[in-house]
Amino acid sequence: MRERHHSLVALVSSAILFGCGEHVERYAPPARHTENARVRPGTVAPAREGELRPYASLVGSRIRLVPSGATFVVPEAWLKWHRSNRNNLHLSHRQLEAVSRPSCEFDTEYHAVVSSVLPFGRCAVHAGGEGWGDGRRRGVSHDDLQMRAYVGGWQPNAVRELIQAKAMRVAKVFSELSRPPITWPPVHKSTRRGEWQVESVAFFLSYGSYGGTANVDFYVRRFGKSTVVLVFMYKEYGHSKSYLARRWAERNERELRTVVDSFSWHDRAQTAAQRTAQPSDGSDAAGDSEGREE
């Protein structure tokens, strides 16, 4: 039964993503409209002609986004997992493509909600406390924090409008697919965290024997002509007061704070040399296997 239910979720996810062409790229002014506006599910959208598709590299304890040059600190626990498993920091084009088709509980729904708003082709990095997708064979649980960093020319208000209009609708569909179906609607909340506008979507998922509240937080901030969206995905256990639930929540909040508070924007990487730094197949100076710089 669980396998049948997950197959249905995956099918609905693909249908939703196929119909999500009107994500934020469609809200850009005509002069900035690109072929990224319609992206088949699970594919990496091409960049504008002459523009480098985003990717990232690991430099010491920081991840650097290319071509923007923006950086943030990687939580120590993520680095420790990476040293042992090499499967939780997805930086190169090839690594990003590998995680663009999640096939397990929670991750499938997270991906569909985020991709209803943001084109995956503008994702520079996907990282987290453990592995992602693929039946969680790359991880051990769904209790860790996962994140993505997107960079594009969108207006922050356009991102917010699509979260309210499309992400909420997609979240509602997945709640209704739960076993038993969840009848209460997803919750959207707007807050601020320093200079970041935070748009949070919370929706309950149940898989029969277990479930929890899926949270997708969009941290949106404008830097000059670019908008950065940091997306955080994590599960909560409602009002559970168990020791482990409290520890997981505290850890996820601590890791989220590490990434957000350390984020630094550098618009110095827009050079011709960097535009040709990575071939389109993802095998590049950022590392075909590890996306790492020493």
Image (cartoon, helix red, strand yellow):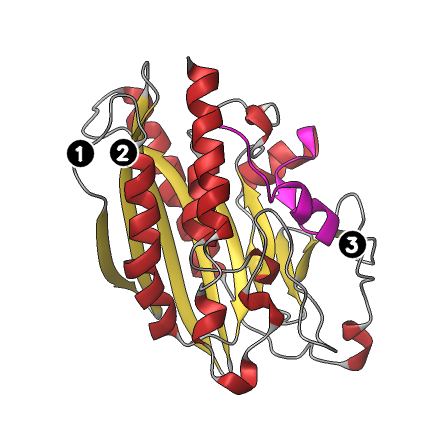
Q: Earlier in the sequence, mark 2 or mark 3?
A: 2
Q: Which residue is mark 2?
A: 176
- Tag on residue 282? 3
* Residue in front for this viewpoint, 198 or 136: 136
- Name the amino acid type tagged 1: Thr
- Tag on residue 281? none
Judged by depth in the image, the label closer to the viewer, 2 or 3, is 2
- In the rendered image, residue 190, in percent from the top left (x then y), is placed at 24, 60
Judged by depth in the image, the label closer to the viewer, 3 or 1, is 1
* Residue in front for this viewpoint, 148 or 26: 26
- Tag on residue 183? 1
- Residue at image position (66%, 35%) is 87
- Name the amino acid type tagged 2: Glu
Using the image, determine if residue 101 lies above or below residue 221.
above
* Residue in front for this viewpoint, 170 or 230: 170
- In the rendered image, residue 183, in percent from the top left (x then y), is placed at 17, 34
Say if mark 1 contacts mark 2, CB within 8 Å. Answer: yes
